[in-house]
Amino acid sequence: MADLLFLAHRIPFPPDRGDKIRSYHILRHLAARHRVHLGAFADDEADLAHAEALRPLVHRLHVEIHRRGKGASLLRSLITRTPASVAALASRTMGQFVDDVLATEPVGRIYVFSGQMAQFAPEDRPFIMDFVDIDSEKFADYARTATGPVAGLWAREARRLAAFEREMAGRAVVSLFVSEAEAALFRSRTRLPAESVQVLENGIDLERYAPAPYPEPGPPLILFTGQMDYPPNIEAATGFARNALPLIRARHPEARFAIVGRRPDPGLYRLGEGVEVTGEVPDTRPWLARAHVVVAPLRLARGVQNKVLEGMAMARPVVASPQAHQGIDAAPGRDLLVAEGWSAEAQAVSGLLDDPARAAAIGLAARRQIEARYGWDARLAPLDEMLTHI
């Protein structure tokens, strides 16, 4: 069994948010075929406590808390002219772990998850670079929607990170993205050949997210899930509550909008009547099972939205913005509804609440599409072929 070094910007457990879901399933796939040495960062002590759960999958394990705050990261970025998001994870101890593993273990393959971790990839070793999506484009999106000095800071981060991404992709054997849309954009930006920029799509645990019967008639529940200190999620939930929900409640006065996810921004608790903010829950599946409609009204979105896949897997009708639908192989009108703008989203949700039979039929079609396209084994099969070239 060949040795492989796996580097991740966030500990791949528990698989309860987008990046952790992807990194955990890739790690598990690789651990079945290689002896894996894992280096990763944790957000805090609670996150660090999950490290031991990964022991059965890995041979050597190093997880440390990244302690550099935003201010220190920005200062280091200004001094070193590196992207602030990369400077945030600069770590002597992580570098020492990588050096020690490479010096003492017969590592033949390296998998780098997230561009921030590419700073630890040795220059004399081949590696796979899993960018997931184009982080520099995310910061460019922030810059386009911000005003004042903040817009300038985002724009500078976008430029520096884009240059860093190009450099790392040039060193990697192959760069991976979660969707063809992201890969095509990166190819156009870097002029790298198609064989150097490929797609490794996300999947979903088909057994864990098993389909649930459509809820019985009652007060309608509209559901949004996500990491709720993440600006695009805050913007989406806030905008929906303020602009779409009142239109929906004009037709369905008992409708509730549940915002389910950890670390909710304080402003979410002030969204008013009909809005429920749960904070962290042990499991989102009971909420999905009770939901009449799942919404993904994101205005800023990159890659593939796991919240959409999870809703579809549990046979829930999903109303998604065009940005949230991008990268997901699902037919609008059959597998989900795509609506652009608050009024259109409100109309789509209200239409589903008016017609439970149609809502249930869309949910069942969604589940069939997920089964056909998004099982993890099928999605990760191309990875084995890629690794043979290292």
Image: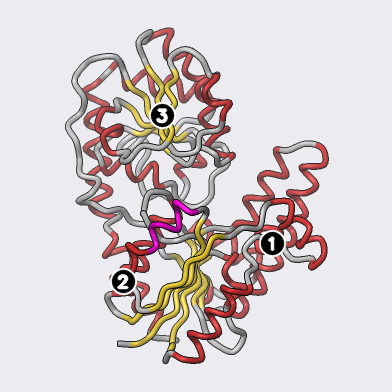
Q: Secondary structure at mark 3?
A: strand
Q: In this rendering, which labeled residue sits more in front, label 3 or label 1?
A: 3
Q: Please report whichever mark, 3 or 2, sits nearer to the chain's N-terminal start.
A: 2
Residue lying at 18% horizontally and 20% vertically, measured from the top left: 216
Q: CA distance from mark 3 to mark 1?
A: 34 Å
Q: Which residue is mark 1?
A: 161
Q: CA distance from mark 3 to mark 2?
A: 32 Å
Given this view, does label 1 or label 2 mark the residue nearer the observer? Answer: 2
Q: Secondary structure at mark 1?
A: helix
Q: Amino acid at mark 2?
A: Leu
Badge 3 amino acid? Thr
User: Between residues 70 and 284, which one lies in front from this camera angle?
Assistant: 70
| Residue to which mark 3 is pinned | 278
Q: Which mark is residue 57?
A: 2
- Label 2, residues with CA under 10 Å away: few <14, some 14-19, many ≥20: some
Mark 3–mark 1 CB contact (< 8 Å): no
Q: Is residue 85 above or below residue 55?
A: above
Disc 3: CA contacts within 10 A as few (<14), some (14-19) or many (>=20): some
Q: Position of residue 260 (x, y in %)?
A: 41, 33
The image position of residue 160, as x and y in percent, is 74, 62
